[in-house]
Amino acid sequence: MQGEFVRYLCARTGQSSGFWINSNPNGTGTYTTFADLEWGTVSCAVSEPAGTLSSLARQRIGC
């Protein structure tokens, strides 16, 4: 499966205000997967099996 993604960050302008900015320099990024789709969330508090997509996601977010 292939696709595109966009990463947005909230730029806060006050206690309860802000705006979304695209953090990718070229607007979008691309990805390719080679296994079944995985849905869910990852947490630094929970370890994931090595070699899984969840494990890679944990590495990417700096766990």
Image: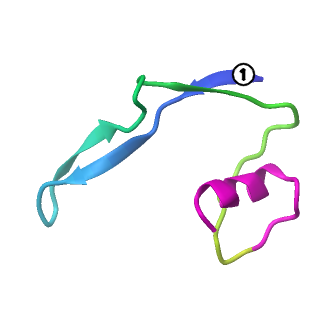
Residue at figure coordinates x 42%, y 23% from the top left: 26
Q: Is residue 56 magenta?
A: yes
Q: Nearer the viewer, residue 37 or 54?
A: 54
Up-down: is 40 above or below 16? above
Q: Residues within 10 Å of mark 1 (few under 14, many from 20)?
A: few
Mark 1 lies on a secondary structure that is strand
Where is residue 19, by image quadrant?
A: top left
Residue at figure coordinates x 88%, y 54% from the top left: 51
Q: Nearer the viewer, residue 37 or 12?
A: 12
For residue 38, side relative to residue 17 (left or right): right
Q: Nearer the viewer, residue 36 or 13?
A: 13
Q: Which residue is mark 1?
A: 2
Rendering coords of residue 49 (x, y %): 88, 64
Where is residue 15, by image quadrant?
A: bottom left
Q: Amino acid at mark 1?
A: Gln
Rendering coords of residue 45 (x, y %): 66, 78
Residue at figure coordinates x 48%, y 25% from the top left: 28
Rendering coords of residue 22 (x, y %): 35, 35
Residue at figure coordinates x 77%, y 45% from the top left: 38
Q: How many marks?
A: 1
Residue stretch in magenta: 47-63
For residue 29, side relative to residue 15 (left or right): right
Question: Most extreme residue toward the left, as rendered?
Answer: 14
Quadrant including the N terminus: top right
Rendering coords of residue 41 (x, y %): 65, 58
For residue 2, side relative to residue 52 (left or right): left
For residue 61, side relative to residue 52 (left or right): left
